[in-house]
Amino acid sequence: MPHAKPRRILVAVDFSAPCSAAMETAKQYAVLTGAPLVLVHVLYLTDNLFGAGTFALPEIKAQITQSAKDELQKMVASVLAEGIGCEGVVMFGIPDEEICKYAADPKNEVDLLVVGTHGRTGLARVAFGSVAQRILQRTPCPALVVPMKKEAS
């Protein structure tokens, strides 16, 4: 990290349980450092039924996009209400690639990346892959991986 404290903290957001744990951790870092958060959500939509990503017709893409923007704006408003600087960005493409590109762009001033993980292992990891792992392999800045909190049994 070229700066003693992060200028901005990027949080990869997918609205899942691991994302909630990552958000809580990122907010703690933001309070400690005074750095604002930038919440990035990447939609991987396609109109190719046999391609990678989520298949969606154009009118459905618009609905999915608006829904993601609305949900992200709620998260931003919640963070701002806690007195933490925050903005949200919705992007399109392959999530790990777009997140790393955003973090690498000097104009975005990202010095720390926070991502949640399900903590899958074995066959589940092979079957579902790990966006967090792919981000770690490509991140241009320090990254913090936050595991999903386990429910007490």
Image: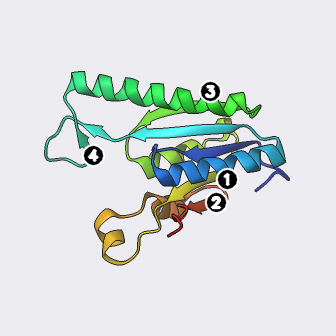
In-image side of 39 versus 62 (left or right)? right
- Which one is nearer the viewer's eye here, 2 or 50? 50
Residue type, mark 2 in image? Leu
CA gap, disc 4 to disc 1? 29 Å
Of the image marks 3 and 1, the number of the one nearer the N terminus: 1
Q: Residue at x 31, y 23 (%)?
A: 62
Q: Which residue is mark 4?
A: 53
Residue type, mark 1 in image? Thr
Of the image marks 3 and 2, the number of the one nearer the N terminus: 3
In-image side of 38 versus 29 (left or right)? left
- Which one is nearer the viewer's eye here, 126 or 149? 149
CA gap, disc 3 to disc 1? 17 Å
Of the image marks 2 and 4, the number of the one nearer the N terminus: 4
Q: Which mark is residue 25?
A: 1
Instruction: State if disc 2 and disc 1 touch (CB < 8 Å).
Output: yes
Which of labels 3 and 2 is toward the front?
3
- Rate crowding at label 2 as few (under 14), some (14 to 19) or many (20 or more) other CA atoms within 10 Å: some
Give above or below for 90 relative to 95.
above
Q: Secondary structure at mark 4?
A: loop
